[in-house]
Image (cartoon, rainbow, N blue to C red):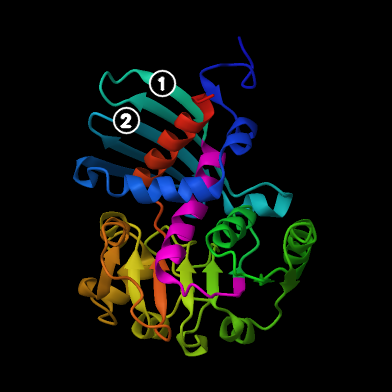
Amino acid sequence: MMSASTDPFHLTAQAIFEKVRFGPLVDALAAMHCDSPADLRDLLLEQSGAQGQDYCLIRAAWQRGQALGVKIASVFPANRSSGLPAIHAAYVLFDGVTGVPMRSIDGTALTYLKTAADSALGSRLLARPDCRRLLMVGAGAMVPYLIEAHCTVHPTLERIRIWNRSPGRRDALIKTLRTEHQVDPADDLAEAVAWADIICCATMTTEPLINGAWLGEGVHLDLVGAFRADMREADDEALRRGRLFVDSRDTTIGEIGELVIPINAGVISREDVIADLYELCAGYPARTSPTEITIFKNGGGGHLDLMTARYIQERCTSR
């Protein structure tokens, strides 16, 4: 049997990262959001472990005549205590006309690229064009990709700060990032939130970390971490103060605690979500003032996995 590194059917993480760059990937996602989005179908199945913390997610999407794909992802938060990423995944891409399997793709690499490019597309559309200060909340395996993606679409970013509940994990990450960026630790979350032009939050918290009273005028808040109905990263006041956007209405509004909890409590309504990426990429007005607060919920549905897989397939098979 061929190893993963020599199997022509399988794309390894190394092969993917050698070919894929965030700038062209973000452009591709923007274009694909305008490519017959009504034909894209998204399916999510999930199962929790005995303690309710470990998760298996199955995300599938099908764009008729183009492609279909399935991702199986495991989310085991306790892995972080042993130095392992919390998320691992595998992905299979099928031909959208014949249904023939075309490619096996390293699902973890795909997830990192998809998630970061999703957030970067959101910040490109919604954040102020003159942003200079990025606050990263969290220090997980996804963080370097989120930082790189935001910096790619905002070349004006000059300083980055990282806050994390565990200073040791934060400081180890900062040491690896300082070869590419000006990165400093943040010890006071409230002060760091007020300092930032862009805040990217990627944690496993179920209790809000971002207090809306801390948000300064003109800030863009990118919420990445919450993926279950009991998870959220920003409090009610943040959602009241900000103009709300999502990557897809179908995979966020009724699915993720970031929106489900405040909607059920009457804090906001479904109508308070102004637009998703399909609408924004089609020209819906995004930021309307340099002083308004914009909030983007990155839900990361299977449709984005499929879009990213199609781009990876194209880049890694082209000469």
Q: Which mark is residue 193?
A: none
Region of the chain picked out in magenta, as a range? 107-135
| Residue with the mark numbered 2 | 67
The one nearer the camera, 16 or 209, is: 16
| Residue with the mark numbered 1 | 102
- What type is the residue that disc 1 sits on? Met
The answer to which image quadrant residue 240 occupies is bottom left
The residue most toward the bottom is 213
Q: Position of residue 266 (x, y in %)?
A: 25, 81
Residue at the (29%, 42%) spot, across then down: 43
The answer to which image quadrant residue 152 occupies is bottom right
Q: Secondary structure at mark 1?
A: strand
Q: Is residue 239 above or below residue 277?
A: below
Q: Secondary structure at mark 2?
A: strand
Residue at the (32%, 30%) spot, across then down: 67
Q: Which of the two discs, 1 and 2, labels the residue nearer the N terminus?
A: 2
Say whether residue 190 is visible.
yes
Q: Position of residue 246 (x, y in %)?
A: 34, 63
Residue at the (61%, 21%) spot, across then down: 4
Q: Is residue 95 left or right of residue 145?
A: left
Marks 1/2 in contact by CB < 8 Å: the verdict is yes
Q: The N terminus appears in which quarter of the rendering?
A: top right
Callout 1 crowding tier (Cα within 10 Å): few <14, some 14–19, many ≥20: some
Callout 2 crowding tier (Cα within 10 Å): few <14, some 14–19, many ≥20: many
Q: CA distance from mark 1 to mark 2?
A: 9 Å
- What type is the residue that disc 2 sits on? Ala
